[in-house]
Every structure is written in C-alpha cells, then in structure tokens.
Amino acid sequence: MEPTEDQYLVLNALETLGFIERRLYDPEIGVWCIETASPILAIAFVLADGEIVPIYWLQDP
C-alpha cells in the first residue's frame, strides 16, 4: 500500500513546524509511525485519512 496524499499533507505540515523527529512508513498496514517533540503525541500513527492517533489509543489497556 502506498502512502496517501492526506498523509503527506499532514507530515509536511508537521515537518514545517519542526515537530517530527523521526518517521517510518509501514506499507503492510498503510500507516506512518512518527516520533514528535510533543509530549502528548510523543509516538503516534498517521492513518490513511490523515488522522493523527497517539499510539496508546490503539493499545488495549
């Protein structure tokens, strides 16, 4: 699966603001895993629709 235009728009905005420290694309599930300077979104996923989801939202408690 290729990255979507929505994902690229979000990533470019975050990079322009200097928030992204690292990023990695997983082609099997179609999401970007990003590490940011934000304590709230320290590690998050950028979904295909461009939504940014903190990693702990996707983990079961």
Image (cartoon, rainbow, N blue to C red):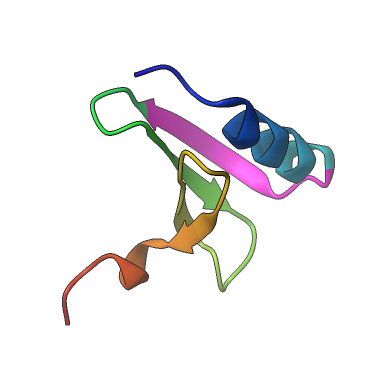
Whether residue 18 is in magenta: the answer is: yes
Q: Residue furthest bottom?
A: 61
33 is higher (above) or lower (below) than 41? above
13 or 20: which is nearer to us?
13
Going 23% across and 26% down the picture, which residue do you hit? 28
Q: Residue furthest top?
A: 2
26 is higher (above) or lower (below) than 14? above
Residue 27 at x, y percent in the picture: 31, 22
Residue 47 at x, y percent in the picture: 45, 45
4 or 41: which is nearer to us?
4
Q: Quadrant of the C terminus?
A: bottom left
Q: Quadrant of the N terminus?
A: top left
Q: Residue furthest right?
A: 16
Going 54% across and 64% down the picture, which residue do you hit? 41
Whether residue 2 is in magenta: the answer is: no
Going 45% across and 57% down the picture, which residue do you hit? 43
Residue 31 at x, y percent in the picture: 39, 37
The range drawn in magenta is: 17-25
Q: Residue furthest front?
A: 49
Q: Is residue 29 left or right of residue 37?
A: left
Q: Is residue 29 left or right of residue 8?
A: left
